[in-house]
Image (tube, rainbow, N blue to C red):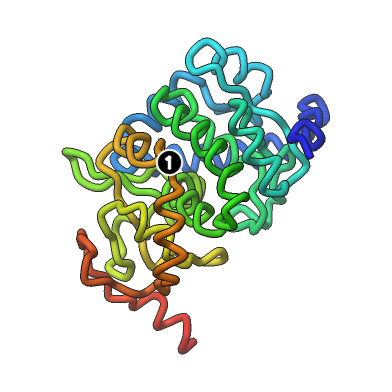
């Protein structure tokens, strides 16, 4: 099914004053946390696109700016959509974003990504050409992964980069993944807490690693640049898929491998405390 079947009108004029206020509270809290924590490219994208200080951004306004820089556009969808239409939209430079916003009692956590997560977390980097090119390549890669039966492995790559990626910079580790960027708790945890393992980016390792969907991550992977991300993923993945199937290996979220390049060896104290609570 084409991704177009899932596109809906954003309904920007239907947002209530309370919904705009919820966005504003989320926005102000996160923008205050990001300086010195988020990578420069993300901050630059927020500034260039003027990501909604006063309320929920109008996708039409965002798209007018994005179309002039990277040719991307944000399209509204009612929530999570299936893999194939998601990949297909990305391959056409269309980023699907939920058009609903969380309720005031969900400020700290919502399981399904809403407009704040999708727009505040994801859209700023779509204004960066290299990152945007990677996202399109990922869309094409996802369509091919379906034929190889390796969508699960490719989803792990998305999770540990686009959603929960870190970056090595001259000023230390910085966040760029949308799942971190849109979460006040994980913005602090991902960089400062001694609990998680932090490893150097490795495509094969990532595609063999499980992840957590409902709590802070126990492992993060750090890129050196978006150029590295694009270079190491804009390739024919078929040999990697063959290797994945041959090795048939899955790393648990707290595991370390002999080949890992360790940036920070975590204590796993947070995860252990949750298990005994």
Crowdedness of circle 1 by 10 Å Cα count: few (<14), some, many (20+)?
A: few
Q: Is residue 102 left or right of residue 268?
A: right
**Residue that extends furthest to the left in the rendered view of this protein:** 170
Q: Is residue 250 visible?
A: no
Identify whether 136 is placed above or below 87.
above
Q: Is residue 229 left or right of residue 186?
A: left
Q: Residue 45, image x and y in percent?
A: 43, 25
Number of callouts in the render?
1
Which quadrant of the view contains residue 77? top right
Above or below, 127 relative to 200: above
- State whether residue 132 appears in this view: yes
User: Residue 5, image x and y in percent?
Assistant: 82, 35
Residue at screen point 76% across, 29% down: 10
Does residue 165 lie above or below 190 as drawn?
above
Q: Position of residue 171 (x, y in %)?
A: 18, 40
Quadrant placement of the N terminus: top right
Image quadrant assignment for residue 60: top right
The residue that label 1 is drawn on is 236
Query: Residue 265 placed where, x, y %?
Result: 22, 69
- Is label 1 in a helix, a strand or a loop? loop
Drawn side of residue 118 relative to residue 253, left or right: right
Relative horizontal placement of residue 264, taking residue 136 as reference (left or right): left
Q: Which of the two residues, 259 or 190, is positioned nearer the viewer here?
A: 259
Identity of the residue furthest to the bottom in this view: 276
């Amino acid at each position: 099914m084409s991704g177009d079947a899932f596109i809906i009108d954003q309904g920007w004029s239907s947002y209530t004053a309370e919904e705009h206020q919820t966005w504003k509270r989320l926005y102000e809290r996160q923008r205050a946390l990001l300086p010195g924590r988020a990578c420069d490219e993300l901050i630059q994208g927020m500034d260039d696109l003027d990501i909604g200080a006063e309320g929920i951004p109008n996708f039409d306004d965002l798209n007018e700016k994005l179309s002039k820089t990277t040719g991307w556009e944000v399209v509204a969808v009612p929530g999570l959509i299936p893999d194939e239409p998601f990949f297909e939209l990305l391959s056409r430079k269309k980023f699907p974003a939920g058009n609903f916003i969380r309720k005031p009692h969900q400020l700290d956590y919502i399981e399904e990504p809403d407009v704040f997560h999708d727009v505040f977390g994801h859209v700023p980097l779509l204004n960066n050409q290299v990152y945007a090119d990677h996202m399109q390549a990922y869309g094409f890669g996802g369509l091919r992964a379906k034929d190889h039966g390796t969508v699960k492995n490719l989803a792990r790559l998305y999770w540990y980069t686009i959603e929960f990626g870190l970056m090595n910079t001259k000023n230390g580790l910085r966040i760029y993944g949308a799942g971190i960027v849109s979460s006040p708790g994980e913005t602090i945890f991902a960089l400062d807490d001694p609990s998680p393992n932090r490893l150097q980016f490795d495509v094969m390792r990532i595609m063999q690693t499980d992840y957590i969907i409902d709590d802070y991550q126990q492992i993060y992977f750090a890129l050196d640049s978006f150029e590295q991300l694009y270079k190491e993923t804009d390739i024919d993945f078929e040999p990697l898929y063959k290797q994945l199937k041959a090795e048939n290996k899955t790393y648990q979220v707290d595991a370390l491998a002999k080949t890992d390049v360790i940036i920070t060896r975590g204590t796993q104290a947070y995860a252990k405390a949750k298990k005994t609570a």
